[in-house]
Amino acid sequence: KFDVVIVGSGHAGAQAALALRQNKFAGTIALVGDELDPPYERPPLSKDYLAGEKPFERILLRKPEFWQERDIALFPGTRIETVDPNARTLTDADGNIMEYGDLIWATGGRPRTLPCGSDIGTAGVHAIRTKADVDQLVAELPQARKVVIIGGGYIGLEAAAVLVKTGREVTLVEAAPRILARVAGPDLSRFYEARHAREGVTLLVDTRTSCLKSVGGRVTGVELESGSELPADLVIVGIGIVPNVEPLLAAGAEGDNGVRVDGQCRTSLPHIYAVGDCALHENAFADGDAIRLESVQNANDQATVAAKVICGQEAVYEALPWFWSNQYDLKLQTAGLSAGHDDSVVRGDPAEGSFSVCYLKGGRLIAVDAVNRPKDFIQSQKLIKERRAVDRDRLADGSVLLKEL
Ligand code: FAD
């Protein structure tokens, strides 16, 4: 029996364990995860790790011995399949039973698959979610000339930026009329579309795939709804994730697209918390709507809240959402959530590769996407947190610092 069992050893799970110890939690802690490696950073998987510019040791969240030093018991390669909230037990895929005092569910999500049968699992078809995914992809790269990426979100775009630089023919297919449509406004989408095109990526927006073509179990192309086919030696599917919450929902927790949590990251089941990508929470920066956030910020901040609550401290999750993406020499930093904006203002000059898109709602700044403009990213945070009304003309003047608004 462990006083706290954390299921999922990604960003949120690892941070929960760390935060428990930082808050002087003296009980026993188990960190159980189905991946084989000790906790590591996920963002580099579609950036420097994919590019071969960072070895795995450098993306570990902590040195392997760290966990032992903090008396945090790691259970790698262990998949939890059922939760019994009355007996306070978990059962893994081998039928082993583990008892918990408190449970932190930090299982993230798994890549969404294409609606058409043949998908991840077919040779040459990959997702980018885990180190194992990327290792398999990289092992196949020497044989691949033509790469088709399905999905124009951050992961697909980052992978496109890395792979086109290796001289491969990269085609990116996006079903929506523009890339990044789910997370950013048209100014940002257009800027990134132009840059990828200039780097040699073929971008097909407003284009739906119908199925994958394969011969002898290996992918050979992607068929589009228009009937035409894109030849491919390698396909990357980056169309979002499905939260790993089935065991908790089966145990009676509220939720559907994620597990419902309150401001203290408690689920509707006693002694069970949920944090990170899998946690459906009411977010103040989304007008109180229940959302899931898929970011390192959210994983870390929610994990810290759950750990404090378990330690008997007062804590509430109200952190400002932020995110980043690296493509080519472009460092994008995002603060706030732009969904629901009714106006936007561009500061700086996109043609020079340094600008920010500021999103407004009712005259108040709600989010900023800063491209190679770190000052805007930093200085916008106070304005967004305070939901400050801003002067539109001064906001548009790139020579006025945001902190002066
Ligand atoms: P995860 O990190 O996914 O960890 C969940 C863990 O639980 C996984 O190891 C999973 O295998 C395991 N698990 C699942 N089910 C079970 C089970 N039943 N039993 C045991 N273990 C289980 N965010 C940013 O802010 N900036 C970025 O630039 C950025 N880039 C990204 C690039 C890529 C390629 C990816 C995949 C994500 C990126 N993200 C980025 C998102 C960020 O990595 C996630 O939001 C973050 O990892 C979420 O942490 P988590 O702990 O909730 O989930």
Image (cartoon, helix red, strand yellow):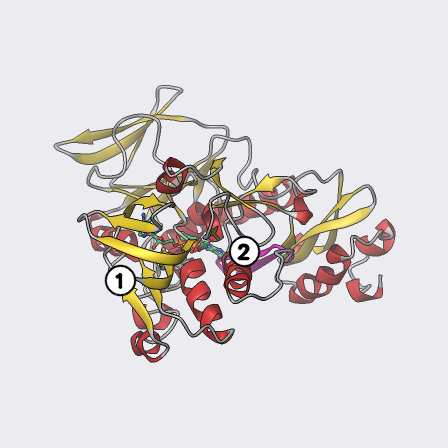
Q: Position of residue 186 (x, y in %)?
A: 64, 40
Residue drawn at x 76%, y 45% as measured from the top left? 360
User: Which residue corresponds to mark 1?
Assistant: 75
| The one of 173 and 198 positioned closer to us in this rendering | 173
Residue drawn at x 40%, y 51% as measured from the top left? 159
Would residue 323 be counted in the magenta stretch? yes
Q: Position of residue 269 (x, y in %)?
A: 47, 44
Three-letter amino acid code of the residue under disc 2: Asn
Mark identifier at residue 298: 2
Q: Earlier in the sequence, mark 2 or mark 1?
A: 1
Q: Position of residue 290 (x, y in %)?
A: 59, 40
Magenta segment, which residues?
320-334
Three-letter amino acid code of the residue under disc 1: Phe
Q: How much space separates mark 2 and mark 1, taking CA atoms?
A: 24 Å
Residue drawn at x 67%, y 62% as measured from the top left? 377
On whether ligand 1 comes within 8 Å of the CB at mark 2, the answer is yes
Q: Position of residue 327 (x, y in %)?
A: 49, 56
Judge left or right: residue 199 versus residue 134.
right
Q: Could you classify mark 1 by the number of other residues whose Cα lies within 10 Å: few (under 14), some (14-19), or many (20 or more)?
A: many
